[in-house]
Image (cartoon, grey):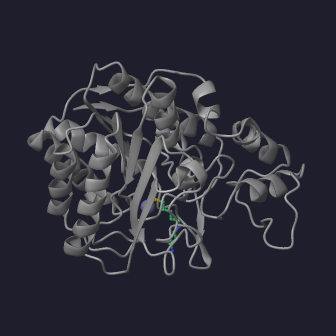
Amino acid sequence: MLTVYSEDHALQDGKAELIDGQLLPCFEMPRRAFLIRDRVREVGLGEIVPPEDFGRAPIERVHDPDFVAFLAGAWDEWAATGRTCDALPWTWPMRTLRQIRPRRIDGLMGYYSFDAGTPITAGTWRAAYASAQTALTGARLIATGEQRAVFALCRPPGHHAAADLYGGYCFLNNAAIAAQFLIDGGAERVAILDVDYHHGNGTQAIFYDRPDVLFLSLHGDPAQEFPYYLGWGDERGAGAGEGFNVNYPLPWGTGFPAWGEAFEDACRKVAAYAPDVLLVSLGVDTYKDDPISKFRLESEDFATYGARIARLGLPTLFVMEGGYAVEQIGINVVNVLTGFEEAR
Ligand SMILES: NCCCNCCCCCS
Ligand SMILES: [Zn+2]
């Protein structure tokens, strides 16, 4: 399996995120992608190629141009105020407040984000842009038929980012951008299967009223888990998209037996939808030792579900999302991919 990977991910190296009432070192760190890359090499998964550059247009097919312009210029606006530390929001337009776009960078960050865990740094825009190009390159390789399965080693992740919203360590929704690129290239149906521990609120929101992209997500129950405010079981899509959004909220402590049952149901729904391409938002924070997550998958479970994905027999693009048990991340990610390869 070919891997698409950009060294530019390392330009996103936040110093701190607000978590548990403190500013702590970022869990979403460059070492994550380095260890995944190293493991890809170690097992000989296949060639590793840099992304092509598709420009901003495919990004703006998913994200609002004003939001993209904000992300591209945010660090410069922050630095122009004389601050050198990472840029974090600290106030948001919640209930009773109006959604009028402010001018001041501090107001803009709150306007466009939903958490204080996603620092904007000097390198954020270049890293996020390269991450989107990484997913687009994987999508192109699948669309042209050059590859049947590709691993887009994206960092920063994307599934929490919506059309004009960043957060959850995500700025641009790599999987959504890739899905839209495939649709624009002639695909009639694309399925996105989000196996990250956290609900892909951004991906859901982007495609919620559309039947041409089926979104399915297994994740920590929003009653007890980030992102809290989306991901409930009754969210089934809206308008023409009714029935094309499937959430599987699962309780803290969920292990592979229960997780696998939901996963099997999701796979059957994907098969019934018969997409031209399957995208997998591959987060491995479902792992039992993940520091910020509460499921209990073992490393071998990742190989098991990778094989199940292969048995769908679909052109498949794996898009890297979360996973914060850093020392084990390479093993767990590549287990999915080798499990897939061995079952093809
Ligand atoms: N106390 C846990 C805070 C988690 N903060 C955001 C997590 C984003 C995961 C992206 S896959
Ligand atoms: Zn996650």
Which percent across, then down, holds residue 87?
A: 71, 54
Q: How many marks?
A: 0
Residue at the left extreme, as displayed: 342
Identify the residue at image location x=61%, y=50%: 162
The quadrant of the image that shows the N terminus is top left
Query: Is residue 113 positioned above or below 235 on the image?
Result: above
Q: Is residue 341 above or below residue 218?
A: above
Q: Which of 12 and 115 is in front in this view?
A: 115
| Residue at image point 32% right, 66% down | 286
Would residue 262 be seen by someone viewing this image from the given angle?
yes
Evaluate whether residue 160 shows in this view: no
Horizontal side, residue 228 vs residue 272: left or right: right
Q: Where is residue 328 in the image (x, y as percent from the top left)?
A: 26, 59
Closest to the observer, 183 or 89:
183
Residue at 43%, 25% (x, y): give it: 51
Q: In this view, does 110 lie to the left or right of 28?
A: right
State the image quarter where residue 264 is shown: bottom left
| Residue 182 drawn at (x, y percent) | 45, 29
- Residue at x 85%, y 49% (from the top left corner): 81
Considering depth in this image, is 58 or 187 the residue closer to the camera?
A: 187
Q: Is 233 positioned to the left or the right of 103 in the image?
A: left
Residue 317, horizontal then vertical, whole percent: 33, 37
Quarter occupied by the C terminus: top left
